[in-house]
Image (tube, coloured by chain):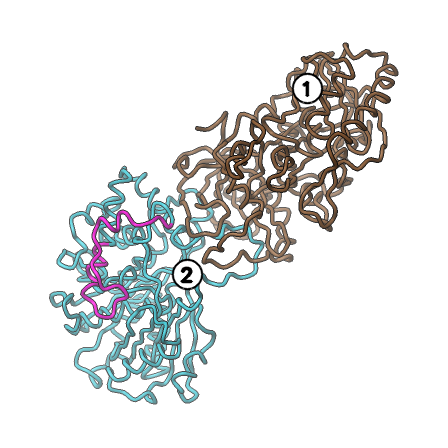
Amino acid sequence: MKGIISYGAYIPYNRLQRKKIGEFFNKPVFGGEKAIAGYDEDSVSMGVESAIDCLAEMEATNIDRIYYTTTSAPYKEKGSVSTITAALNLTANIHAIEAASSLRSGTSAIMAANESEKTLVITADCRIGAPTGQNEQWFGDGAASFLIGSGEDVIAEIVDSGTVQGEIITAWRSQGDSFTQDWEERLGTTVFLDQVKSNVQPFLEKNNLTADALTKVIISGPGTRAHTAAARSLGLQTHQIQDPLFDKVGRTGNAHAPMMMVSALESAQPNDQLLIINFAEGLDMILLKVTEAITQLTQRKGVKGYLERKSDKVTYSDYLKWRNLIETEPPRRPDTDRPSAPALYRGYRQNLSFTGSKCKSCGTPQFPKQRVCVQCQAKDEMEDYRFVGQSAKVTTFTLDHLAASPAPPMIVAVIDFEKGGRIICEVTDCNPKEIKIGMNVEMTFRRLSEAGGISNYFWKARPIRQKESS
Amino acid sequence: MSKKGITDKVAVIGMGCTRFAEHWDKSVDDLLVEAAYEAFTDAGIEPSDVEAAWLGTMISGYAGITLSGPLKTQFIPVTRVENMCATGSEAFRNACYAVASGAYDIVLAIGVEKLKDSGYSGLNAPRPASDGTSPNISAPASFSFLAPAYYNKYGLSDEQGREVLSKIAWKNHYNGSLNPKAQYRNEVSMEKITKSPMVAAPLGIMDCSGVADGAAAAIIVRSEDAQKYRKDPMYVKALSIAAGPGDGKLRQDYDFTTFKENVAAAQAAYKQAGIQNPRKEIDMAEVHDCFTPTELVIYEDLGFSERGQGWKDVLKGVFELGGELPINPDGGLKSFGHPIGASGLRMLYEMYLQFQGKAGKRQLDDPKIGLTHNLGGTPMQCVSFISIVGKEIS
């Protein structure tokens, strides 16, 4: 039976405390905090990070298909799946579709996966709410990924799924809009509850289930109140309602229900039954039954792990700068050049999958790829060598106050990999006071720059963290 | 390099150097004319006596016409050279070889740079089109990698390291205060240096060389002809340049407490000049103090200090004007300023003045052998130039 083989998630390191928004505008706000993508993150980079988490310690060569879903893609025209495929070092012949626009596309993609294939579903969103509005407070950024297939490795069988198309204007962002707009919340809530009442009960009956048999119900509805109302209408007990992560992450767009699913799977036991109800102009319903195999899945960072790795030091003004919501004085440095498309084309496998070369003659790993070995000068004796997944150490560093950066000072370090090889790169998600020689770091996929409308993705180092930093 | 190189084959018979400064009122052309004509006058030659010229500039112009235009040279060959911050030295080196080869009898080497017209902070060289993946870090940041690496390797606390770097900046500012052509002609207190605003931590603004406009020039002839022009020419004992393969970017065994290029260039130059003990045999040096930790590492790379001992020599005052081996008597890049293409020739200009006893308040006691060291690039990968020059022919 078709099911989930693995899951992964990503929550950006920076969390904005909602009270900081309130302090800035001198108005009452909701409590808690929201996860915000760093200045070097977007729906593609977060999606890749969640997929790396999902595929940890797994053979990724036999994946047949990628479904990438987001409502906040970097481009209106130009896909992102080829970027993601290269970043994950997957086969170029992989079948891929990306779905935009619908906040339901994450769950729809899970339903669309075939039993006979292995499908990697990547959901990510990074939406911007208009300053002073409620969306600004509630929207959070994040990503979740699932590997879907069949066989003994399935940790949660997709017992059944159903879908309803129900046209309604609740939340929308036109091609020209910068921010999501909403109709008054009661409209969406009412319509959502109607759809739940008329569709969920028959779906459960069809599967010979009653609501009390469900271990957890994952509900992502319009706004922040609908999910409690929906849970009540289904007669669920509090312990059955999956935490919607509003206070810690926020509403993560099309990745919201998927991130809640990850969260639910993290604490699930064999034979648990999970129901997912995801709303956007209709409903997606998925019924999962957890299997014994879940006990064999190696630990992912997941929602739980990434919730612990955080900094809440970010200020609201940082956030405004990172989202280009305020115009600031430009540095007295040249603008970042638009990257050369031919140079990107030549290096895309190398740069996106972080694959360098290793000298067959002397064994020295090198990045970027070299023709002549830096160690033994052998010519054209190189084989491809991927650096991702290795730990590395800071050999020396600088805090560059002069370099143009949305978050000065730019931390740049000389990074030496445990199995050989060196790169000089930016260190991200790091407090300038933390960096020191010998610090352990790992590579993370980021959007280096956007210049001339081109998003340029590459890798940076980040401190290896076990839990919240001070 | 052949066994003997070009030791004592060529000599400098005239030099000129503009003040290095924020020359808001002078163009590249003005600076070139000023430096070249000062050199012509000093050598006692007519501009038309020059048979060929080498122009060094990194970002202030292209091709030989950048020089032939303002000088109105009459269809002589002019070669524009570029080797990053070692550009001025590279112009000199190529001019020397041309004379030594016998192709020309009298040539001009000149370097110029106009940094202050861009409106940017620091040096901003145009970057070739690229995939944009290498971090666009500032020049001070590239060199600031040296400081924590050096402290860590030799067990200096941040405070000790800070004192050493400040002392280097203090020395160069003191020397510059005695030099009427320097960009900065004031002494700067240790406290001010130590507390200067961060540019690329741990380097503050006072760890950085001056961003300046300027030009410097030299007239070169074969040594056997030199006495026809003046009784006190400067003789070239050794010229070397080493271009690195980029070990710092790619190899883990490079530890950011040295420039391999410096070591290679120094060994080659010492061999040519027959120098066994540089600390004893060299009377003075102008080195590439683009940032304070660069100068610290250079002491050790060039054999002026033992490995790991450079910082102690700084604190002992070894490299101060009255010390055992004065370094950067003219104020160095730090205080004289660093108009890229001109700096290498400016270093030679100080050697020349010192040999002739014309260095004013900073005059050393009859130096006979001097060294200039000029570096283009970063600790990760650079070109390193060294010249050894002398008052006398051996």
Give coordinates of residue A77: x percent, y percent: 73, 51
Q: Residue furthest left?
A: B365
Q: Is residue B385 visible?
A: yes
Residue A418 visible, this angle: no
Label 1 Cα neighbours within 10 Å, binned few <14 / some 14-19 / many ≥20: many
> In the displayed structure, would residue A251 be above or below residue B267?
above
Please, what secondary structure does the residue beneath circle 1 have? loop
Residue tagged by mark 2?
B123
* Residue A297 point in image, percent of width and height: 65, 20
Quickly name the residue at label 1.
A242
Left or right: where A196 falls relative to A430: right
Label 2 residue SS: loop
Q: What stretch is highlighted in magenta?
A: B170-199
Q: Is residue A7 left or right of residue A159?
A: left
Query: Which chain shows up in cyan?
Result: B
**For the residue carrying disc 2, how many other residues have a C-alpha within 10 Å: few (<14), some (14-19), or many (20+)?**
some
Cα distance in 3D space between marks 1 and 2: 56 Å
In the picture, one chain is brown; tell me its letter.
Answer: A
Residue A357 figure quarter: top right
Residue B304 location (% of width, % of height): 22, 53
**Residue occupying the far front of the picture:** A27
